Amino acid sequence: MTPGDATMNGVRLSKLMAERGLCSRREADRHIERGWVYVDGQCVTTLGTRVAPGATITLDPRARAERDKALTILLNKPVGYVSGQPEKGYPPAASLVTAANRHRDGGPGDRRRVPEHLPGLAPAGRLDIDSQGLLVLTQDGRVARRLVGADSDIEKEYLVRVEGDVTENTLRRLRHGLALDGRPLRPARVEHINADQLRFVLTEGRKRQIRRMCELVGLQVSGLKRVRIGTVRLGRLPVGRWRLFGENERF
């Protein structure tokens, strides 16, 4: 099957590119429109083209160069900022990514220059308006897919302050057996740190998941901070400040 004679049995080219980790589907469409995508040696410029699942896909060097320039930013989001689309009266977390808010501590990425404007910078995962901590903003569709794709199993660690009685039965239920919106949750690691604080380690990110889990076992969340995504830690990054994701860092 070639791009010219692909049937409805083929796979949408942009979907296949995303599944192979070449880029996001949105980036794939942009590359296709620019004539930067080749399928089995043929240039494809038509959006929606379907190809054989085993087709050989190559990118023009200009697409690879654009991908290599894509930036990923780590932000310590304060309470009161929304991670995604702005809501009335609440600013988006991306508005904090300014030159004045950049944190320099000699760590990874400290010497890299950042353009004044960062088109396509989007959150890779949500962090509730009432929550603080590590938020990833990226121009790289591969990073977004790794963190929030349907098959992602990257760990996210949270420190959670709660009100209510924490018993061994409470912890057992939080670790396994709860469901939200009619769907069971993946097993979680939950530890009792001190009188009113728990540590959660999750591999999924349902909307307001931890708060809703706690409500199901009779606990009320009074504070929530994300401190780790994969191997990347919030560390000493101050609230409201950001730094570049290091070239040698991996989630």
Image (cartoon, rainbow, N blue to C red):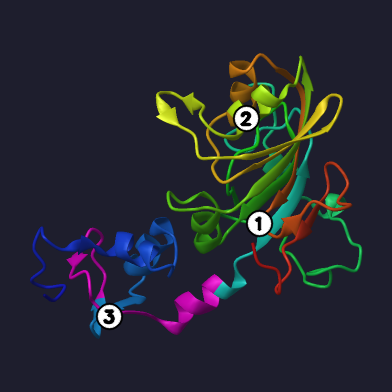
Give the residue drawn at x 70%, y 31%: 91
Quarter location, residue 165: top right
Q: Which residue is mark 1?
A: 230
Residue at (44% x, 60% y) in the render? 24
**Is there a contact, CB below 8 Å, between mark 1 and mark 3?**
no
Element on which disc 3 rests: loop
Q: Crowdedness of circle 2 by 10 Å Cα count: few (<14), some, many (20+)?
A: some
**Gap between marks 1 and 3 measured at Cα:** 31 Å
Q: Is residue 45 magenta?
A: yes
Pick the residue in front: 210 or 35: 210
Which x, y percent locates residue 196?
Answer: 84, 24
Mark 1 or mark 2, earlier in chain? 2
Q: Which residues are magenta?
A: 44-67
Q: Quadrant of residue 197?
A: top right
Q: CA distance from mark 1 to mark 2?
A: 24 Å
Q: Nearer the viewer, residue 51 or 60?
A: 51
Q: Amino acid at mark 2?
A: Arg
Please, is residue 166 above or below residue 200 in the view? above
Query: Can residue 87 be seen from the camera position used here?
Result: no
| Residue, disc 2 | 172
Callout 3 amino acid = Thr
- Residue for badge 3: 56
| Callout 1 secondary element | loop
Q: Earlier in the sequence, mark 2 or mark 3?
A: 3
Left or right, 70 with reference to 13: right
- Of residue 62 and residue 246, the one placed in the foreground of this image is 246
Percent position of residue 120, x then y: 56, 54
